[in-house]
Amino acid sequence: MNAALPISELNGVIGSNLPHEGWNTVGGLVFGLAGRIPAEGEGVDLDGYHLVVEKLQGRRIIAVVMEKAPEPETPEANAEE
């Protein structure tokens, strides 16, 4: 997705409540959560989603891939195997 997408629009589309108080765009959110300029292929996890930097242009995040984060394994899941 285009990293310039406003977080408020993304929240409306996916029905989430990703924070948008400190950041306006998806790229800004990823940058803020990483705490630095992430490299292409690096990602962050937030509220059950994994956001990965797909494309950078200089210091700017241009494209992000977003997917549901994998469910953490629980001891109960291991007991069923």
Image (spheres, rainbow, N blue to C red):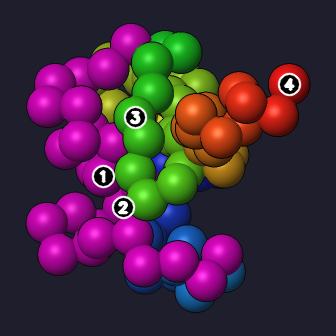
Mark on residue 44? Answer: 3
Residue farthest to the right, as pictured: 81
Instruction: Using a 10 Å C-alpha cutoff, classify the residue at mark 1 as few (fewer than 14 neighbours), some (14 to 19) or many (20 or more).
Output: many
Q: Is residue 63 left or right of residue 24?
A: right
Q: Residue at x 29, y 70 (%)?
A: 19
Q: Earlier in the sequence, mark 3 or mark 4?
A: 3
- Whole-percent x and y of residue 62? 49, 37
Foreground mark, 1 or 3, reads: 3
Q: Residue at x 54, y 50 (%)?
A: 49
Instruction: Using a 10 Å C-alpha cutoff, classify the residue at mark 3 as few (fewer than 14 neighbours), some (14 to 19) or many (20 or more).
Output: some
Q: Amino acid at mark 3?
A: Val
Task: Name the secondary structure under disc 1.
Answer: helix
Task: Name the secondary structure under disc 4.
Answer: loop
The residue to which callout 2 is attached is: 25
How many numbered marks, from 0 up?
4
Answer yes or no: do the residues labelled 1 and 2 have beta carbons within 8 Å? yes
Foreground mark, 1 or 4, reads: 4
Q: Quadrant of residue 56?
A: top left
Mark on residue 10? Answer: none
Instruction: Give the magenta range.
Output: 14-39
Q: Earlier in the sequence, mark 1 or mark 4?
A: 1
The residue to which callout 4 is attached is: 81
Q: CA distance from mark 1 to mark 4?
A: 38 Å
Task: Name the secondary structure under disc 3.
Answer: strand
The residue to which callout 1 is attached is: 29
Q: Is residue 25 left or right of residue 14?
A: left
- Whole-percent x and y of residue 57? 42, 23
Q: Earlier in the sequence, mark 2 or mark 4?
A: 2
- Whole-percent x and y of residue 16? 53, 77
